Image (cartoon, coloured by chain):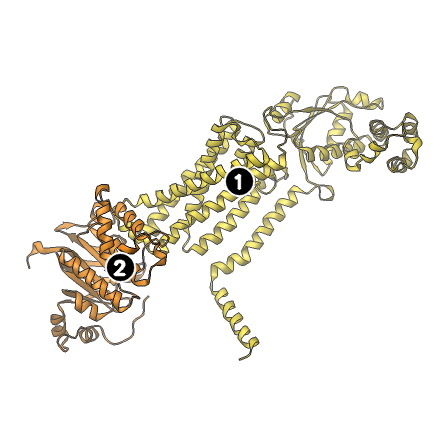
Chain colours: A yellow, B orange
Amino acid sequence: MNTWSAAFLIARKDLNLYRRDRTGLLLGLLLPIILVAVFGSVMKFAFGGDGGMPRVAIWVCDEDKSEASQKFVAALREVSMLSVRPGAKSKARTASGLRTLVRDGEAHHALIVEHGFGEALAKDAEPPLTLIRDPGRQMETRLVGIGLMQAMMSSGGGRSMSWMMSSMMRRYGMSDQGVARVRASMDVMQNVIGLFASGSEPELREADDGDAALKSLDMSSMFGQMVPVTKEDVSPPDRPKNLGYQLAQSVSGMTVMMLMFGLMACSGMLLVERDQGTLRRLLVSRAPRSSVLLGKFLFCATVGMVQLVVLFVFGELVFSIDAFRDPLTLLALSVTWVAAATSFGILISVWAKTAKQAEGVATLLILVMAALGGCWFPIQMADLPWYGEVVTRSTLTYWAMEGFQGMLWHQKPWTDPVMLRAMGVLWGFVAIACGVSWRLWQRRFVGT
Amino acid sequence: MTELADLLVVDELRYSYGERVAVKSASLTCRRGEILGLLGPNGAGKTTLLSCVAGLLSGFGGKLTFDGKPFLPSDDASSRSRLGLVPQELALYSDMTATENLVFFARMQGVPSGDVDAAVQRGLDLAGLVDRKDDRVSSYSGGMKRRLNLAVGDMHAPDLLLLDEPTTGVDPQSRNHLFECLQSLRATGRTMIYTSHYMEEIQRLCDRVVIVNEGIVIGVGTTEELCRQAGTAEGNLEQAFLAMTGRSLRDEA
């Protein structure tokens, strides 16, 4: 027999074995399909804006209530990269209501169309707009700026373009002569900006030493600032200055997801115990049978707590995330999430017939929940339909992220209603999962 | 033998796994201080019978009596404490040492903390592992693991020790050592139920033998009594067994 014949025989044998492992086969084919479907759907909602840009939620309050302001808000709703809230048919919020939303971390950007908006536009002047924002959400700020420009141009047409360009060019150091040329020549505006930006016509600049300003002229940033707004930054006073939103998101997401993987491996020891025969020995022992399941729970929970401590100490030392700022909240959240992740692991272990099945199903569920719950990227960014919201809120990871982001980013104490709600949902799951696990344990392991 | 000498009485025991009947009707008596052999072809119901007695299965028909009292080990921890189990598989923690395994199971069996050291020493002596007591089980030979498997099952000096094919996969020397261990236990008055496929083991160790076939007890007695019952040559348990259970091949379900 030559090498190829032998290799062919071995490959055929392995294919036969692979085909007979129904669970492995199903997961091998199903896992990629499910993950592609989940991620595809989430990304579609998250990056459904123009040119694949993310859709950013922005709360709007029209204080002016003029024809122009209503037209502007309507145009904002048409901007595909923005998701304007509340909806057109929903009850409007007041300016103070929006400030509360941002302060409580329920929203990251809110726009107040101030009194006098319509009047200013009629005079070709800068209309009064106030943007209340979480300064840590810089990417969203930039997208909101672009969205405001689109809406302003759409609602005001050429007239808006005139003052917008003038205002912006002045901010970048353009002389009055240049501004005048821009205002007089809107049809060649793009060329003028191009000349200015390239620096090939120095007379457009107020001073010759404006090279530094030109070099810093970033077109995306420029368009994001075309509509002048008064910014009101709202952020928790104790938030570390070097803690970015993406960092907080990554730390929370990885903490939540990796703990689930870690505890799944630990709770799988129940199946190992069964397969190596020690479980039978334990069940015949004098110890109450419930102690075996409880012992596994305690073991997993201890490992989980140690994992969390190590993760947060690392985050503190390397990234200065200030996780130990509020030890009580950290402890409450950690205990809650460890209990929930342990319950999940135990539930899978008592449900699965084999260790391989448990591993496959757990991997699938953890990855899907991580994606839907916002561990990999902020799911709040996605403009989900109502059923999408229901699905994401049905995952353990969503509530865990709500808690950890609430603590790390929004600096909320454990007594905050948002935190209590998140922990309450997780403890509810713990109760249900433990009840179901107990029944399955009795039926499948104890034989009663 | 008087009624008082009976330790375990199994009366009309029945058990099914769903539609499949594993034990149709099994009645037997295990007397105090004896080694009772449980013999049967593959799939005869021996392990199911043993599992019912050990409390690993519940919801069976019939009745168990232990020391003259109704016995339900699946529901009652104190009933289970009177049993010891030596399963067919090596039910040990291979990343722990012999001492650690013995200490752990002694505590799980409720051995008082003051008596644990003595129980561990007795277990190490029984297993012949005093010199290797602090080595991990994973470094032991198959025979050493088997001996430790037996010692762990007997940690709490149970009234009844259930042995499910305890010599599977061991060499003749280790098997001989195990026999000596079991005989030394019998000398202390330990009662045992011993299942095996090896006729010579049963003949050498057991006082009486129960033959199970297709979920039914078809013969109980000493080797001589069974040979007489089967009409085969005296002293040849294998011939009696084949005569009673037939020569057709059996497979586990």
Q: Find residue B20 and report its image quarter.
A: bottom left
- What x and y, as percent, mark residue A218? 79, 36
Name the foreground residue: A303 vs B96: B96
Disc 1: CA contacts within 10 A as few (<14), some (14-19) or many (>=20): many
Residue A26 seen by the camera? yes
* Residue at x-position 18% and y-position 54%: B160
**Residue A41 pos. (x, y %):** 62, 47
Mark sitting on residue A57: none
Q: Position of residue A224 (x, y in %)?
A: 76, 33
Q: Chain of mark 2?
A: B
Q: CA distance from mark 1 to mark 2?
A: 45 Å
Quarter of the image with the N terminus of chain B is bottom left
Vertically, is A149 above or below B33?
Answer: above
| Image vertical order of residue B48 relative to residue A52, above or below | below
Mark 2 closeness class: few <14, some 14–19, many ≥20 residues within 10 Å: many
In the rendered view, tell whether residue A430 sits above or below residue B11. Answer: above
* Coordinates of residue A274 in the picture (x, y in percent): 35, 54
Chain ID, mark 1? A
Residue at the extreme left: B2
Under tag 1, what secondary structure?
A: helix
Quadrant of residue B208 within the rendered picture: bottom left
Mark 1 is on which residue type?
Thr
Q: Are marks 1 and 2 in contact (CB under 8 Å)?
A: no
Q: Identify which amino acid the numbered label 2 is placed on.
A: Arg
Q: Residue at position x 71%, y 38% from top?
A: A81
Q: Which residue is mark 1?
A: A255
Name the residue beneath numbered marker 2. B147
